[in-house]
Amino acid sequence: MGAFGTHTMWTEVGMELKRTVKFEADRDPEFARWISHTVGGERIRQCLQCGLCSGSCPLSLYMDYTPRRLMHLSREGFKEEVLSSSSIWLCTACYACMVECPKKINVTHLMYALKQRAIEEGFYPKRFPIPVMAQQFSRMVRRSGRITESWLVVRVFLRSAILRLLGMSKLGLRLFLAGRMNVRKERIERRQEIVALLDSVAATRKELAL
Amino acid sequence: MPEIRSPGDGANREPPRVGVYVCHCGTNIAGTVDVKAVTEYAAKLPGVVVSRDYKYMCSDPGQALIQQDISEHNVNRVVVASCSPLLHEPTFRRVLSRAGINSFFLQMVNIREHVSWVHLDKQAATEKTKDLVRAAVRRVSLHKPLQKRRVPINPNVLVVGGGIAGIHAALTLADAGKQVYLVEREPTIGGHMAKFDKTFPTLDCAACILTPKMTSVGSHPHITLWTYSEIVKVEGYVGNYKVQVKRKPRYIHEDLCIGCQECITACVYKEGKTPDQFNLGLSKRKPVYLPFPQAVPQKVVIDPETCIQFKSGKCKKTCVEACGERQAIDFTQTEKFEEIEVGTIILATGFKTFDASRHPYYGYGRYPNVYTSLEVERLINAAGPTGGEVVLRDGTRPKSVGIIHCVGSRDANTNRWCSKVCCMYSLKLAHLIKERTGAEVYNFYIDMRTPGKGYEEFYDRLLDEGVHFVRGRVAEVSDWAVHPSEEGKLVIRAEDTLAAFVRRIPVDMVVLSVGLEPQADVQEVRRLFNISCSTEGWFLERHPKLAPVSTFTEGVYIAGACQGPKDIPDSVAQAGAAAAEALALIDAQFVELEPYTAFISEEECSGCKSCIPLCPYQAISFVEDKKKAAINEVLCKGCGTCVAACPSGSIQQNFFEDDEIFEEIEGVLAYA
């Protein structure tokens, strides 16, 4: 990348210099357009960048980009930064940001939209438990109409942290003996209606985002 | 006019009976000064017959105390130890008047600003208060009865500057039936507002709301409009100013020209050759021109610098031919001087915009497609050089535009102040550019300042419209491409402080939102009207909060951006306020002046004439037959210059006579 790419000249002394300046070519205008047209993104352009969302967020403690920065980066179209951010996975949907936002921006809804987009585009660490959980959850709902907690937990651990499953086995056994864990798969009747519902939601989302 | 001094009237006719009144001012004074101790101390001073303290001496019960003592204890001299005389001297003078004694038998001691607010040591502060009270008691015993002077007010008003502020002030006064002289330096009124296309936040067409007012000025029976004119001399004082106006030759008889502009068409120049000042040089004009289509007055101007007739005397004079029988063109015109008499003056001389080339990193003057905001106003204006098309120098439409805020504002290298209007006009320009060109628009700002009715809502609207907002002061505009997408573009480099990384944004057009500055000749104008300027060069108001349109010179008011950066609504509001202040003075019909004038003891005056050239108000003349100097009390402003300069000490000043001042000094120094 020449003068503005990654410098390798310091690698032998253990220091790698990366380009941090952003070019307009780094922006994805389509992403910026998508975020303001997606459900919850109607008012994202009005964001004043006051930082109230970050201040009220109990998880901003661990975030690489605070919710405020995510709002700004999204509407400016810095897709890579946003979708590879750990912040979107840390959001617990407590809604503290949305309750107080002076511009009534649906920050939490946007976090969901970003999670979904990140999954679609494969922008997350493959073994990170939160997206794995989200995927397994929705897959299970689609198939059975509801989830079976025991099997969901097992699936999540199998796909994220297999070794931790062993460490948790004792707890699992005790829960099972106490009758708190059901291994029988739960399912609802007329499951095709759930599928139709989910398909319809997905279609509407796609339509709105166009 | 009544005599200022009443000779023999009570000078030292009866023995002084002093009343001393010490104010607590709540805890303002009493918190630091032991007022009881001061009161008891004062009671024992020679000449003092009564000494009291009270929580708020300026309150009605406080005033009643003094009035009662004057009638019951025959108090004939009053000392009030309280706040600055600037605040309550008039209050206590009225008390003395009401009680039937001369109001100048009062001496105030400022024990708040001069003592309690500036000292921490309570005991020392109390001792200082005693010293000051003692001095006042000794001084007040020598006070002589004085009378305020009354001078009549000339109802005519001079308004200087024909921008929106001057126009509004002139119309307000003229509608009230006063004769107004409106003097404008340029060939037309309208000022900066006439250059704009739209106004924020309502996006009203500037011309649509301004030109009706301009035409009213031009046709108002009570307004004498002198454009292309300047004030050269101001003499006199409140209510009675004599002003000399220089009327530059426009080589056109204003009364004969009908504004048909046939001379412009007929000019031997087929095309304009001179940069058009009104369009900031973005178009060319001929030597005979009208600044803009709605100019008031609709009278052309001839520029002798470029007119062939003036340069060689050998022009075919096709313009004169076209003018025909009207014979409005007169190459022999010279500058004229008019003398007018007015009672009040309103200064509405406006501002100039920051010279963007002073900020070399933004490339103004180096890159052709870097414009100032005022230039872009002209590009957007339908009557402007491009007929309202926002285009680059090569005539193509920009696909991306960067607007840089705070150019020449909030910067210790240029101007420290916030120019107040730039955030809003930048938003307006962003909207208009996006609307006209569909370009991607970027705003680079430090803080977005949108206080004002409907202003924040306008910002919201722009955010919604998809204009980019990058919070960060731009470091540089360059044409140095380091990425293929930057080839052939102007690259703006700034930290996006909200994203927390540096961005390089290539654009086709850069707009520099230049700040507002005082006019270049502000110091000369200030001296001409004898008013003050802040260090930045804005005209100084008498009080930033309570007298925002008055100046330290009575009868001279300020309105609009000459007092500080201001938008149109604020300028108009201030112009209305200045007009109201002038009207209040006119309606009172006379003004009361303090009697602190100087007077000459004829026996002692040696006729040396040293005082005469020193007087800033030309109030001293030399009486040839007596060989003595004489002071005109009406012109004397009581500055005291002659008093200090007189070699024989024969000039004294009322209320500041030598014995009064010496007595006061001795009073301070006489430790008890």
Image (cartoon, rainbow, N blue to C red):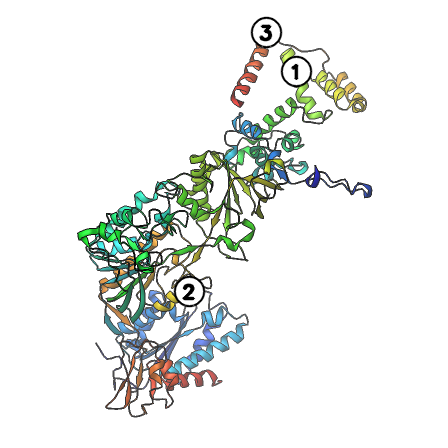
Question: In the image, which is nearer the foreground, mark 2 or mark 3?
Answer: 2
Q: Which residue is mark 2?
A: B533
Q: Which residue is mark 3?
A: A190
Q: Chain of mark 2?
A: B
Kind of residue at badge 2: Cys
Q: Say which residue appears at 60% left-offset and 41% top-offset.
A: B504
Kind of residue at badge 3: Arg
Q: Dot 2: what SS?
A: loop
Q: Which quarter of the figure has residue A167?
A: top right
Question: In the image, which is nearer the foreground, mark 3 or mark 1?
Answer: 1
Residue B297 in view: no
Q: Dot 1: what SS?
A: helix
**Going by the image, does B557 lie left or right of B126?**
left
Question: In the image, which is nearer the foreground, mark 2 or mark 1?
Answer: 2
Answer whether labels 2 and 1 touch (C-beta < 8 Å). Answer: no
Figure disc tally: 3
Q: Which residue is mark 1?
A: A139
Tell me residue B529's x, y (percent).
34, 67
Q: Dot 3: what SS?
A: loop
Q: Say which residue appears at 60% left-offset and 33% top-offset.
A: A27
Residue B119 in view: yes
- Front residue of this view, candidates A2 and B664: A2
- Front residue of this view, candidates A127 and B281: B281
Q: Residues within 10 Å of mark 3 (few under 14, many from 20)?
A: few
Question: Could you give the CA–CA distance between mark 3 and mark 1, rounded to whole angstroms?
Answer: 16 Å
Q: Chain of mark 3?
A: A
